[in-house]
């Protein structure tokens, strides 16, 4: 049902990223939001403000199962992306291969 999940992670207030998914072979859904809520991360649908000032989803999954599948796929990709961003190869500390210069008490000027 859903494929080609793409997530762009970033942080702005409670927003943690934006996502898009392909539905079947027909349509891309864009503008999905990865949001940090009171109970953890969730996927928010694109919404529009109505005349009463309420935000209503522009589109939404047709069933609880579809919502669960969509949320799992988007959050899995989100975690994969933030994991890839934080998993940088460890670089060893620079090593000084210069041999130490021998110093004796006669070399100290004071």
Image (spheres, helix red, strand yellow):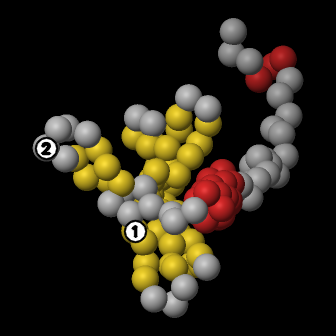
> What residue sits 86% from the left and 23% below the top?
104
In the image, residue 50 sits, relative to residue 69, either above or below, namely above
Residue 70, by quadrant, is bottom right
Q: Nearer the viewer, residue 41 or 45?
A: 45
Classify 10 Å Cα crowding around label 1: few (below 14), some (14-19), many (20 and above).
some
> What residue sits 38% from the left and 63% below the top?
59
Provide the residue designation for mark 2.
51
Nearer the observer: mark 1 or 2; the answer is: 2
Classify 10 Å Cα crowding around label 2: few (below 14), some (14-19), many (20 and above).
few
Q: Position of residue 56 (x, y in %)?
A: 31, 49
Residue 84 seen in the figure: no
Q: Nearer the viewer, residue 14 or 110?
A: 14
Residue 78, by quadrant, is bottom right
Residue 30's tag is 1
> What residue sits 47% from the left and 69% below the top?
20
Residue 109 horizontal side relative to residue 6, left or right: right
């Amino acid at each position: 049902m859903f494929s080609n999940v793409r997530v762009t992670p970033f942080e702005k207030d409670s927003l943690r990223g934006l996502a898009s998914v392909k539905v079947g072979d027909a349509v891309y859904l864009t503008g999905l939001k990865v949001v940090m809520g009171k109970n953890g991360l969730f996927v928010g649908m694109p919404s529009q403000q109505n005349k009463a000032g309420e935000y209503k989803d522009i589109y939404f999954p047709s069933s609880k199962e579809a919502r669960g599948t969509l949320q799992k796929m988007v959050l899995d990709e989100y975690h994969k992306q933030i994991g890839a961003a934080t998993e940088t190869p460890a670089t060893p500390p620079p090593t000084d291969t210069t041999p130490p210069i021998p110093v004796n008490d006669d070399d100290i000027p004071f």
